[in-house]
Image (tube, helix red, strand yellow):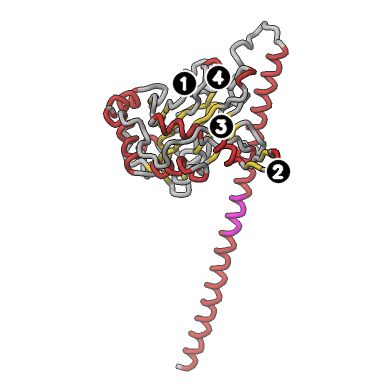
Amino acid sequence: MYQANLKGGTILTETDLREALMPARTYSNLTMYINPNLPNSPSHYREIFQNNKPFKYVVIEDFLSNDLAQILLNDFPFFDPKKALNEIGQVGRKAVHENLSEISDSYQQLANYLNSLEFLKTISQLTGIEGLINDETFYGGGTHENLHGQELDPHVDFNMDERKWYYRRLNLIIFLNQEWAEDWGGLLELHSNPRQPEENQIVAFAPTFNRCVIFETHEYSWHGFSLIQLPTEKQHLSRKSLSIYLYTKERPQAEKGAPHTTFYIPRPLPDLIQPGKVLTAEDYQNIKILMKRRDDLIHFYQDRELQESSDLASLKSRIKRYIASRYTWSEKYLQMFLSWQQKMRRLL
């Protein structure tokens, strides 16, 4: 928790700072969540969603009610380094706050709405995917804040919630940035196939205020965002968003894959790196950064494989001990039975 010492020994907590710095809210109970005009034209958005490329997606402007969007921005949590650990355990420039209910009363009300049948039915109407289920824990989702210098490599998300064996079907991302220019980077990118950079087709969207992007998640729904490069005088800003992941109990057989975690593809060399070009100091530094990220990713996957191999070996050992234990008891009871049978024969 951040604190600030004031004259007279007064200490303001993070909550006090938010209340002091943010505009006062005019009401405490939210009565309108999404734009009331959306349910009037679901077929329009559903057709766009179903036909878009490189995979199914739709972009909806002014997704939330204007009042709610502003309140969520006002209540957006401060950047917390403890919530900014990356896959290799280092403090990065992306903070994720999964527990919406602990952020503020308004976020708690929103979390309740996101779990409601009304919301899930609306998203089903907008996409054509029935039987949607929200994850009440918002695992991996919630508020996302990315600072200057952060980017996200193309990746395919984990495909199942293994706690309940639900299939992950949709990512719904709402951006909360009132001031953002496209040349600042941080654009959400949808990729056709980042494994083949020469053929990869990318569509990109700026993270502008109250813009919502909904896209289907499956084995080739590659996405990420470009490097955030804020002007010096704007580096107090950050890329803020709210991420919601929706699931179903089943999905079409052709779309099913073995359960897996998130797969990342490191970005290729920049286009300006070409044969015969003399590298500048900046070019050299960019190559070093790309190589370091690739090495870190390889290290991460190696560590994960070793951990999973260790877990598998431990499980095999436990199974063997269990079977041996059961066999020992079975052998013991068999010997007791044979002994009793011999006694009975002698008596007879």
Residue 87 visible here = no
Where disc 4 sits, the SS reads loop
Q: Write down the residue under mark 1.
A: 205
Which-is-in-front pick, marks 1 and 3? Answer: 3
Which-is-in-front pick, marks 4 and 2? Answer: 2
Residue 145: give its label.
Answer: 3
Q: Write down the residue under mark 2.
A: 9
Instruction: Name which quarter of the figure residue 213 lies in.
Output: top left
Q: Tag 3: Cα neighbours inside 10 Å, few (<14), some, or many (≥20)? A: many
Residue at 44% from the left image edge and 49% from the top image edge:
164
Which-is-in-front pick, marks 2 and 1? Answer: 2
Q: Tag 1: Cα neighbours inside 10 Å, few (<14), some, or many (≥20)? A: some
C-alpha separation, residue under disc 4 versus residue under disc 3: 14 Å
Residue at 54% from the left image edge and 68% from the top image edge:
326
Q: Could you say where residue 310 lies in the image, as x and y percent from the top left?
A: 63, 49
In the rendered structure, which segment of residues is drawn in magenta? 311-318
Q: Tag 4: Cα neighbours inside 10 Å, few (<14), some, or many (≥20)? A: many
Q: Could you say where residue 130 lies in the image, as x and y percent from the top left?
A: 31, 38
Residue at 55% from the left image edge and 73% from the top image edge:
329
User: What amino acid is found at the position of numbered circle 1 in the picture?
Assistant: Phe
Q: Could you say where residue 348 lies in the image, as x and y percent from the top left?
A: 45, 93
Q: Write down the residue under mark 4.
A: 185
Q: Tag 2: Cα neighbours inside 10 Å, few (<14), some, or many (≥20)? A: few
- Discs 4, 1 touching: Cβ within 8 Å: no
Residue 327: give its label.
Answer: none
Which-is-in-front pick, marks 2 and 3? Answer: 2
Which one is in front, 302 or 182? 182
